[in-house]
Amino acid sequence: MTLHLQPITLEEAKTFIAALHRHNPKVVGWKFGIGLNDGEKVVGVAVVGRPVSRVIQAREAYTAEVLRNCTDGTPHAASKLYAACWRACRAMGYRRLITTTLRSEPGTSLVAAGFTELYAIKGRSWDCPSRPRVDSHTIEDRVLWELVA
C-alpha cells in the first residue's frame, strides 16, 4: 500500500480527530494540517500550531508543535505524518518542532521520524481557585519530544 500526503482543511482534520483520536478529540490551534491517504480514503491527519506552553511560545519564536497526530491504525502512517510536518516546518523557517505523548505511549513513530525524547511533564489539572475549569483532557504524565534543525 502506498501512502500519499495531501492538503487538509481544519474542519476535515477536526472531523477525523473527533472520530478516531484515543484521548484528545478536540484540537485547539492551527497553523497548518497534513492529511494522508491510501489512494481511497484519508487514513491519518496531523495538525501543527504554535506551542501550547506559554513559556515555550514566549522564549522560542521559531518553534512549532504537532498538536495532534491521528491515524486509523494504518502501518507507518503516524511516522510519515510526523516527518512531513517537520519538512513543512523547516520549509517555513521553523528551527524546532515539538510534540507530547502520554507517558503510557511508546513513541515508536516519533523515534522513526527522528524525534528525541527530552523530559517528562507532570500531568495536572487546569482547574484552580482563581480560574475554575472543567478538565476535558487526560490528566496523565506526558513526555516532550523534539526535532531541531
Image: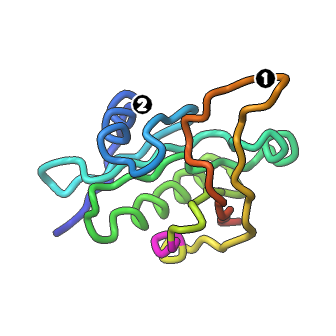
* CA neighbours of label 1 inside 10 A, class few (<14), some (14 to 19), many (20+): few
Tell me which corner region of the image, top left, top right, bottom left or bottom right, holds residue 71.
Answer: bottom left
* CA neighbours of label 2 inside 10 A, class few (<14), some (14 to 19), many (20+): some
First to last magenta residue range: 106-110
Tell me which corner region of the image, top left, top right, bottom left or bottom right, holds residue 28.
Answer: top right
Residue 127 screen position, x and y as percent = 73, 32
Residue at 52% over, 52% down: 88
Q: Amino acid at mark 1?
A: Arg
Which label's residue is closer to the chain start, 2 or 1? 2
Residue at 45% over, 48% down: 23
Q: Which residue is mark 1?
A: 131
Mark number, residue 99: none
- Residue 149 in view, yes or no: no
Position of residue 106 relative to residue 55, above or below, is: below
Position of residue 66 relative to residue 128, above or below, is: below
Q: Amino acid at mark 2?
A: Leu
Dominant SS type (magenta): helix
Q: Which residue is mark 2?
A: 10
In this picture, residue 53 sits left or right of residue 105: right
Q: How is the image coloured?
A: rainbow
Name the residue at the front extreme.
129
Q: Nearer the viewer, residue 104 or 62?
A: 104
Residue 22 among magenta residues: no
Residue 1 screen position, x and y as percent = 16, 69
- Residue 67 in view, yes or no: yes
- Quarter holding the C terminus is bottom right
In this picture, residue 25 sits left or right of residue 40: right
Residue 37 screen position, x and y as percent = 24, 53
SS assignment at label 1 = loop
Residue at 37% over, 32% down: 9
Q: Nearer the viewer, mark 2 or mark 1?
A: 1
Residue 107 among magenta residues: yes
